[in-house]
């Protein structure tokens, strides 16, 4: 039995302890904003925040999550999350949209750590998130816009 | 589709309202979130015609006959309707239409389908007529209710007004009355100079849900009692199951059943992880007797051998053979080999099946040809087509992958559902490995080019041989193999293009921009080499041969102007250019490239000019150019699916089938040529020019022409 916090609520899981957090969140908790894209931590579509840090949930066994706080796209909040979502909408970043939960989660984590990121900071924080529609040009611009909006 | 059909459909909707309600009951059994989105919306919306529904809250829902997987049809088609309806953009919504090959036909295909960058082009008048018809019916209803002449009623930003009597209403109040009006035989459409929404950068309708995780894709549909199924596929194309041992798989907690299906061995489980673990535990012996056992290298050698054989004639202008015999010629030759490419959309193929109480089945999937999926699923499930409803869902990309004649993916998914006994709702999903190894690739191609330059420095002859699979499965000439080459835009007096169709068991498919993925590269790199040989500037040289092609010339000139072509280029960088027409849209691109730290090209900037006729939404057009550039660039730099020794597929996931990432994405600047031509598509045309433009810059920078793709293989070799 694994006990953890999901978007502020205490949850338990008593299935196979090897089950990745991704499938616990999607199949058992029915929070489907977190996506499957590769299963091997190559694409970042499954990014959640684990104890405040971005984490690829597809390679995180639920047994590792005992006592941890998990935040998904459905629960992410705060000024960085608001700024990122507003900036994303402002530039109409998404195309197919499938990877964008992961992009948003990585971008929020970046701004929580680095409020005014450089292009190199953005490359470092976002290179793990693949977008096959290649919305990268707008993702970069939206992160800069979000950072600027938090200054005021 | 004619207006008559729209009218008939409207009457059908009203007459069959009992049926509509019975359909609406079905999703109740999937009360637990998240459910699939029912195509066409629910019975609370009043249909004005097959494409426009109005809610009592004044919302206008456009039923999109085209799937939304990122190229913007929800926004584009809603813009066309809203323009003629004189709606306010804030009241517009979009949903996928139900499946109906007649009512919702792509007017370019003759059946329902999305592809070939055709959504806006085929629906431009149809959607405007749907909006104008609904407007006329709302006005007629208001005139009747208010007892005033319809001619005195105006509509603006979603408000119906009668100035003389100072009356005003939203659409919702008149929706039901409007639906009972006789639609006008031929609604009057606006002149383009009167457009107020078309041509403006309206915000996209689907952005919000795609930013906060609430947008529902097929993979997200999770009804109660759901069974998850995955299939173990072979690692060789053409292989079949000889025997299998499922003892270990059945021991996995959560695995419910294991069944052989024509495509492999299906594992059914209560959750996704159990299904995957169960699949890993299978032991399967494959029969390779009919499998492709040649490697990509061996295939390429076989392809190149065909260069010397007579091929299928695609173009034969002037007399190429004589032209090459002229004295005093310089000739240039090149052979280029293109690899198999997987589409690798972010959401791998998937489908959800839910049986209703009456035995009919709702299918939820990202259907590019939903009518075909319906036919195939009905056959496999042994149901009448009317008992199978295909509810098209938002899809996580496609790039051509989900557009398959004969619906081979649905054949697998439906076979898996049928084999399960169809007693529980079922989600069939492919993993990334299934996707990369699943075939339906952009085929391998080999091109042989020969060019002749006379003593005056004019290009007098061009010969091109193209060897590869016929995507359309044809024995005679396949236009998709030679498009962009057989209609070479450059004025060269002697032109000969031939092709060879190679039969292979590796299934081929169109990949974002189809034939232009390779012909664009071959033509635009080779013409550039010819200009280099005669010492002509690549932009000036092209323009001199495009005097009869004003739209090609227009985008080329614009891209060159944007880049300040001929101006100062930073130390260590070089520029390349390419111009390609595809799907009746014209795109010119200039790129700036240096040698990256890993020895591969680093693309810093792309200047892109596009002429797609009347621009419906410039913001969406720019986004498609940016995305097309990233998609095309990633493939040219990094990607190949390779068959290794014995024909085994080598790549399996994003670690060895690399996607372009944010740190590799160039800055992109896009300009749209102002045009009065009818609108054409933008989903694909941004892709073809970037590869050859980069290869041209690379040749200029390093002296090395690119003869084999991906480029990263050459520099690491």
Image (cartoon, rainbow, N blue to C red):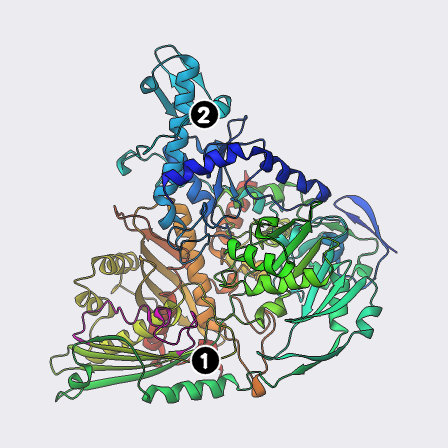
Q: Check if residue B483 falls in the magenta segment.
A: yes
Q: At which x and y percent is residue B357?
A: 71, 45
Bounds of the magenta segment: B468-494
Q: Residues within 10 Å of mark 2 (few under 14, many from 20)?
A: many
User: Can residue B598 be spotted in the picture?
Assistant: yes
Q: Check if residue B242 falls in the magenta segment.
A: no
Which residue is farthest top? B165
Residue at the spot x=18%, y=70% of the render?
B491
Majority secondary structure in the magenta region: loop
**Marks 2 and 1 in Cβ contact (< 8 Å):** no
Q: As drawn, is B194 to the left or to the right of B242? A: left
Q: Is residue B180 above or below residue B423?
A: above
Q: Which mark is residue B178?
A: 2
Q: Residues within 10 Å of mark 1 (few under 14, many from 20)?
A: few
Q: Nearer the viewer, residue B136 or B566?
A: B136
User: In terms of sequence position, does the residue under pointer 2 or pointer 1 come before the other?
Assistant: 2
Q: Is residue B443 above or below residue A148?
A: below
Q: Quadrant of residue B190?
A: top left
Q: Nearer the viewer, residue A46 or B374?
A: B374
């Amino acid at each position: 039995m694994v006990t953890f916090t999901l978007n502020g609520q205490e949850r338990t899981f008593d299935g196979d302890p090897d089950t990745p957090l991704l499938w616990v969140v999607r199949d058992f908790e029915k929070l489907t904003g977190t996506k499957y894209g590769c299963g091997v931590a190559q694409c970042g579509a499954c990014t959640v925040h684990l104890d405040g840090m971005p984490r690829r949930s597809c390679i995180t066994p639920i047994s590792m999550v005992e006592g941890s706080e998990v935040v998904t796209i459905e629960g992410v909040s705060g000024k960085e999350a608001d700024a990122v979502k507003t900036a994303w909408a402002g530039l109409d970043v998404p195309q197919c949209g499938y990877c964008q939960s992961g992009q948003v989660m990585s971008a929020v984590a970046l701004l929580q750590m680095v409020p005014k990121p450089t292009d190199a900071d953005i490359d470092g924080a976002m290179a793990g998130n693949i977008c096959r529609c290649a919305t990268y040009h707008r993702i970069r611009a939206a992160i800069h816009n979000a950072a600027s909006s938090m200054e005021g | 589709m004619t207006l008559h059909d729209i009218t008939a459909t409207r009457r059908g909707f009203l007459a069959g309202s009992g049926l509509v309600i019975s359909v609406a009951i079905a999703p109740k059994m999937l009360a637990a979130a998240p459910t699939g989105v029912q195509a066409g919306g629910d019975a609370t919306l009043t249909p004005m015609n097959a494409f426009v529904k109005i809610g009592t809250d004044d919302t206008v829902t456009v039923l999109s006959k085209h799937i939304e997987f990122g190229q913007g049809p929800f926004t584009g088609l809603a813009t066309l309707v809203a323009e003629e309806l004189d709606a306010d953009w804030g009241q517009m919504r979009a949903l996928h239409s139900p499946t109906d090959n007649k009512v919702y036909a792509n007017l370019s295909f003759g059946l329902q389908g999305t592809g070939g960058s055709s959504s806006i082009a085929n629906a431009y008048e149809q959607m405007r007529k749907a909006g104008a018809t609904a407007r006329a019916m709302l006005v007629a209803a208001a005139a009747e209710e208010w007892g005033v002449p319809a001619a005195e009623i105006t509509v603006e930003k979603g408000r119906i007004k009668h100035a003389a009597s100072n009356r005003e209403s939203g659409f919702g109040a008149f929706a039901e009355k409007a639906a009972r009006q006789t639609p006008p035989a031929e609604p009057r459409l606006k002149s383009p100079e009167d457009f107020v929404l078309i041509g403006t950068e309206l915000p996209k309708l689907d952005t919000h849900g795609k930013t906060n995780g609430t947008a529902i894709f097929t993979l997200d549909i999770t009804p109660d009692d759901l069974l998850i199924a995955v299939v173990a596929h072979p690692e060789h194309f053409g292989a079949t199951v000889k025997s299998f041992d499922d003892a270990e798989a059945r021991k996995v907690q959560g695995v419910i059943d294991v069944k052989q299906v024509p495509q492999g061995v299906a594992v059914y489980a209560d959750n996704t992880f159990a299904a995957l673990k169960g699949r890993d535990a299978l032991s399967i012996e494959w029969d390779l007797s009919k499998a492709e056992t040649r490697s990509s290298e061996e295939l390429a050698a076989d392809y190149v051998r065909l260069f010397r054989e007579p091929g299928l004639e695609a173009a034969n202008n002037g007399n190429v053979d004589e032209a090459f015999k002229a004295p005093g010629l310089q000739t240039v030759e090149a052979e280029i080999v293109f690899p198999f490419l997987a589409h690798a959309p972010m959401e791998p193929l998937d489908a959800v099946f839910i049986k209703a109480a009456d035995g009919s089945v709702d299918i939820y999937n990202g259907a590019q040809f939903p009518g075909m999926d319906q036919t195939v699923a009905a056959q496999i499930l042994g149901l009448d087509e009317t008992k199978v409803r295909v509810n098209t869902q938002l899809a996580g990309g496609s790039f051509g992958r989900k557009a398959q004649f004969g619906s081979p993916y649905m054949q697998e998914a439906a076979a898996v559902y049928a084999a399960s006994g169809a007693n529980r709702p079922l989600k069939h999903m492919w993993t990334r490995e299934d996707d990369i190894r699943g075939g339906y690739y952009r085929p391998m191609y080999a091109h042989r080019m020969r060019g002749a330059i006379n003593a005056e420095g004019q290009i007098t002859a061009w010969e091109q041989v193209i060897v590869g699979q016929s995507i359309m499965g044809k024995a005679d000439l396949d236009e998709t193999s030679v498009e962009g080459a057989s209609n070479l835009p450059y004025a060269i007096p002697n032109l000969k293009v031939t092709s060879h169709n190679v039969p292979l068991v590796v299934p081929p498919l169109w990949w974002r921009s189809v034939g232009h993925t390779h012909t664009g590269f071959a033509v635009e790199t080779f013409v550039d080499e010819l200009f280099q040989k005669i010492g002509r500037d690549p932009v000036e040289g092209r323009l001199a041969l495009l005097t009869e092609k004003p739209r090609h010339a227009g985008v080329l000139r614009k891209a060159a102007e944007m880049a300040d072509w001929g101006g100062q280029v930073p130390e260590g960088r070089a520029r390349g250019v390419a111009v390609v027409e595809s799907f009746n849209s014209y795109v010119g691109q200039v790129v700036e490239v240096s040698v990256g730290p890993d020895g591969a090209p680093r693309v810093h900037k792309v200047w892109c000019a596009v002429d797609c006729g009347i621009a419906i939404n410039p913001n969406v057009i720019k986004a498609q150019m940016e995305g097309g550039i990233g998609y095309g660039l990633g493939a040219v730099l990094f990607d190949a699916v390779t068959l290794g020794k014995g024909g085994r597929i080598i790549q399996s996931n994003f670690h060895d089938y690399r996607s372009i990432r944010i740190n590799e994405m160039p800055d992109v600047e896009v300009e749209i040529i102002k045009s009065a031509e009818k609108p054409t598509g933008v989903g694909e045309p941004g892709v073809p020019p970037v590869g050859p433009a980069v290869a041209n810059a690379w040749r200029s920078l390093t002296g090395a022409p690119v003869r084999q793709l991906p480029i990263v293989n050459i520099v690491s070799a």
